[in-house]
Amino acid sequence: MLILTSVLTTGALTLTACGSRDDSSGGSGDGGNQTVVIGLDAPLTGDLSALGLGIKNSAELAVKTANKDKTVPGITFKLQALDDQAQPSVGQQNAVKLIDTKEVFGVVGPLNSGVAQSMQKPLNDAKLTQVSPANTGTELTQGNNWKSGDKKRPYASYFRTATTDQIQGAFAAKYLFETAKIKDVYLIDDQKPYGAGLAASFKATFTELGGKIVGTDHVNPEDRDFNSVATKVKSSGAKAVYYGGEYPAGAPLSQQIKDSIKLPFMGGDGMYSADFISLNKKAEGDIATSVGKPVEELESAKKFIADYKTAGYKDAYEAYGGGTYDATWAIIEAVKIVAAENDGKIPADDGRAKVLEAMDKVKFEGVTGPVSFDEFGDTTNTLMTAYQVTGGKWVSKLSSTVE
């Protein structure tokens, strides 16, 4: 969500749009080593760049760590980071670029579920492993008919370290109904795959629990004037608003609603960013859910946090830093498995297919806890956390595993 890059033929350097060079190799490798490039797709510019840059930096840190520790002897990892601007069409173009770079054996990202939909098929056709730290759209792994119980994995090359909207929406509904004791909610979404899916999941569980949806609305995520929506919320009798969407529109939406009526505004991980607070003068008391547990509270994340600080990144790792490190490390682990079975090298002819096959064997203790994937490519870690803006910052309130 900063630099649009394209990799030179060696894969050792990236060339920025402004013409300067950025070494993303994570350390110089032995001249005899094989280069394995891990691609990355995220919004590095634009409204969502705070999250995108945290993803890029965290993936880069994993690559640097693997090279420094010689995690895979004979292999030097490099990162090729591309900016999708949170646009599906750009994400699809980036997928083609990564496919065409023969040294790429895995891809981390994207941030947005809508962008993922445009990337899944070409990457799958190329047998190129993709691991997203942020996509939560349930249909991405379980197919469009998952709601009816007909779960079918659409693309074998797609994995994620973030849990699904089905789980996140249900967790949010239970938190609002059972913990916050709120029974009347106004439901809004931004009409994008992520927002609409999250709102639908929330609604299903909330009404099943006995909650009432007192009104619904859709907003354009590019808009910033939501006064007409605020008027509807005020007259609805709602005791809270649930928003399926991201923080660039969520922040002004929350603030304008509170200009009319004071009530809590809740959303998903797309709202869980420091930028939501900085863009919203009335964020105090607002609630967001996010995948996993705060890395600051995890013993398993202490090294990641210390290493990130030591690396001197000026952008925070944000909501998806730990999950991104684990997503990148999952690819590194798969490469390690393949190299061990092929005399320390990744075969040039079918290396991508072998790395993809190895993903089924990947299992390790990551920054966010145990990392492994189920038969759909979903993370087996379904831990969720609810946060509330308290004293001008996000404070964790409740963490639990969702079945």
Image (spheres, helix red, strand yellow):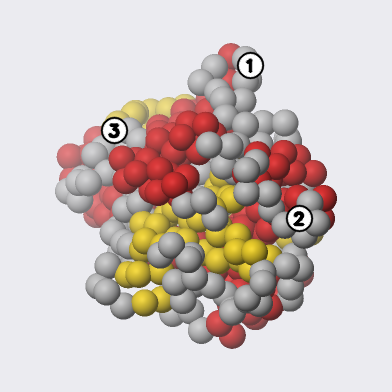
Helix, strand or loop for disc 3:
strand
Q: Amino acid at mark 1?
A: Gly
Where does residue 225 sit, x and y in percent of width and height?
17, 48
From this view, report whether residue 326 is shown above or below residue 162.
Answer: below
Mark 1 vs mark 2, CA separation in Å: 38 Å
Question: Label 3, on which residue?
Answer: 218
Where does residue 82 sit, x and y in percent of width and height?
40, 57
Q: Amino acid at mark 3?
A: His
Where does residue 20 sit, x and y in percent of width and height?
31, 78
Whichever of labels 1 and 3 marks the residue nearer the N terminus, that label is 1
Mark 1 vs mark 3, CA separation in Å: 27 Å
Circle 1 or circle 3, nearest the eye = 1
**Residue at screen point 40% across, 35% down:** 118
**Residue at screen point 62% across, 20% down:** 152
Q: For residue 15, which quarter of the picture?
A: bottom left
Q: Amino acid at mark 2?
A: Ala
Circle 1/circle 2 CB separation < 8 Å: no
Question: Label 2, on which residue?
Answer: 339
Where does residue 84 sit, x and y in percent of width and height?
35, 51
Q: Nearer the viewer, residue 189 or 74?
A: 74
Whichever of labels 1 and 2 marks the residue nearer the N terminus, that label is 1
> Left or right of 68: which side holds 262?
left
Mark 3 vs mark 2, CA separation in Å: 49 Å
> Left or right of 252: which side holds 333?
right
Helix, strand or loop for disc 2:
helix
Circle 1 or circle 2, nearest the eye = 2
**Residue at screen point 35% across, 36% down:** 192
Question: Label 1, on which residue?
Answer: 149
